[in-house]
Image: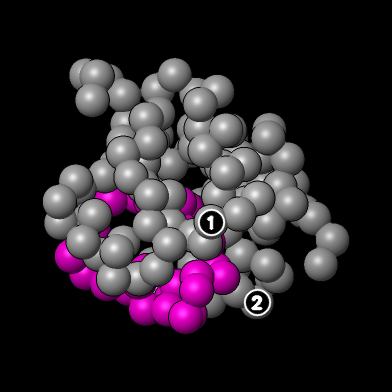
Amino acid sequence: MDIGRKSVIVVGAPGRLREGLILVLSLFPCLQVAGLAEEQRAALDLLTEKPPDLVLLDSDLPGGGALALLKELKTRRPQTRCLFLGANGKQLTVARDNGADGVLLKGFQIDDFSAAIDQLFQPGNRAGEIQPRPQPD
């Protein structure tokens, strides 16, 4: 990985959301996709093998376990930022309460994603500080 670029692991089922995230990440020269995982065990293996700067975590993991993965991530690597992508406000609140550094409602705008990434890597950012534009449930 290039010096100065932040490594990202994308955790989510193969499909439009994951492919879209990979495409969006390619627009950010400061970010580099370091790995993909579609379930909890593979994600934990990647965290050990290639510790990332950021994990993008889809709430709808195959077999469930997104919140358990979030908790385990924050236990093992509290310095790794996690942006949780949820389907509704309740999921976002629970993710924030369980250590997500930022949350976005699926269907977000690129501007909100960009703002979230910028905020995640600002010095002194605390969990839950990302405040994207409100979106309807």
Q: In this view, does 95 lie above or below 130?
A: below
Circle 1 — which element? loop
Between circles 2 and 1, the one closer to the viewer is 1
Start-end of magenta stretch = 55-83
Q: In this view, does 39 lie to the left or right of 59?
A: left
130 or 9: nearer the eye?
A: 9
The numbered mark at residue 90 is 2
Q: Which residue is drawn at 43% across and 57% down?
A: 11
Amino acid type, mark 1: Pro
Q: Would you say residue 97 sits in the magenta stretch?
A: no
Q: In which quarter of the image is the N terminus?
A: top left
Label 2: few (<14), some (14–19) or many (≥20) C-alpha neighbours in 10 Å: few
Q: Is residue 96 above or below residue 19?
A: below
Going by the picture, which residue comes out furthest to the right? 136
**Residue 2 image point, x, y percent:** 24, 19
Amino acid type, mark 2: Lys
**Residue 29 image point, x, y percent:** 44, 19
**Residue 126 image point, x, y percent:** 39, 52
Q: Is residue 41 left or right of residue 59?
A: left
Residue that mark 1 sits on: 14
**Residue 67 image point, x, y percent:** 43, 76
Residue 123 visible: no
Going by the picture, which residue comes out furthest to the front? 14
Q: In which quarter of the image is the C terminus?
A: bottom right
